[in-house]
Amino acid sequence: MSGAAAGLALQGEARERSMLTHLLHALNQPLTGLQCSLELAVATPRSSEQYVRTLCEGLSLTARMRILVEALRELVHSSEVAEAVSDFQLEAALADCVDQLRPVVAVKSVELHFVSHCVLPIQADRNRVATVLLRTLGAAVSLCRQASDLQIEAATIENRASVKVSWIPDPAPEFSPFSRPELGLAIAQAAWESSGGHWAEHREKNRQTCTLQFPLALCQPGCKKQSGGAE
């Protein structure tokens, strides 16, 4: 790993620790709400309708906690797995992830556009990178407006491999900003950065974009369009 990548990796590890603290703090809110709700339910006799309402509120709070606990488990597991660095082509790993995603995209009636402009050799843990890519794409599909489009582009920017994922978002999902897909993006970002990559997000007009970059293992001057397609 280069010096620049190592510096990014340290920043990524710090981000993982910060996110862990953030998730634990977020978990305390529904947990406290559930405890208060149950304490009030047993403090004085209530009508059947009030008990049912309390149970429904408790189930909603429990659902929020379950999502947060799943995110915590995934984050801890990701940080504990040792990386096995090797040389591979990022665009090939991305193409595999896109193929796995196609059935999910079809169910949501989302039009998928994937284009890869050149070979993108990098040195990283292929399994970890594939997991991050699949997590990112899966979260994007979940957040994508039905019957809209998802754009995925692999290219080079200076001496970096770049994967840009862009979609038209739906209104904020349930439990936002701690919904399952939003947490999926946050976990993917932490894992990507801890491996030495750079992650950027921005929103322009009605499109949300995530750009994942990683130092190239070998510069490829004069890259030509290698593969692509639209469905």
Image (spheres, rainbow, N blue to C red):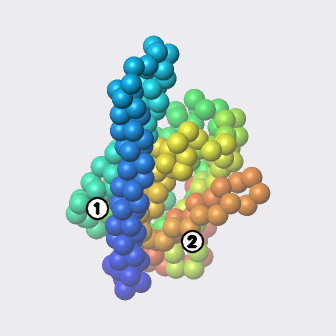
Point out residue 211 in the picture as x, y percentages from the top left corner. 57, 64
Q: Residue furthest front?
A: 44
The residue positioned 59% from the left and 56% from the top of the image is 165
| Residue 2 position by quadrant | bottom left
- Classify the position of the C terminus by image quarter: top right
Q: Three-letter amino acid code at disc 1?
A: Ser
The residue pinned by badge 1 equals 79
Residue 215 vs residue 42: left or right? right
Point out residue 10 in the picture as x, y percentages from the top left corner. 35, 77
Compare marks 2 and 1 and give the one earlier in the sequence.
1
The residue positioned 74% from the left and 52% from the top of the image is 206
The residue pinned by badge 2 equals 156
Q: Residue furthest top?
A: 48
Q: Secondary structure at mark 1?
A: helix
How many numbered circles are shown?
2
The residue positioned 70% from the left and 40% from the top of the image is 148
Residue 152: image tag: none
Q: Nearer the viewer, residue 23 or 217?
A: 23
In the rendered image, is residue 85 in sight? yes
Residue 194 vs residue 113: left or right? left
| Residue 65 position by quadrant | top left
The residue positioned 66% from the left and 35% from the top of the image is 146
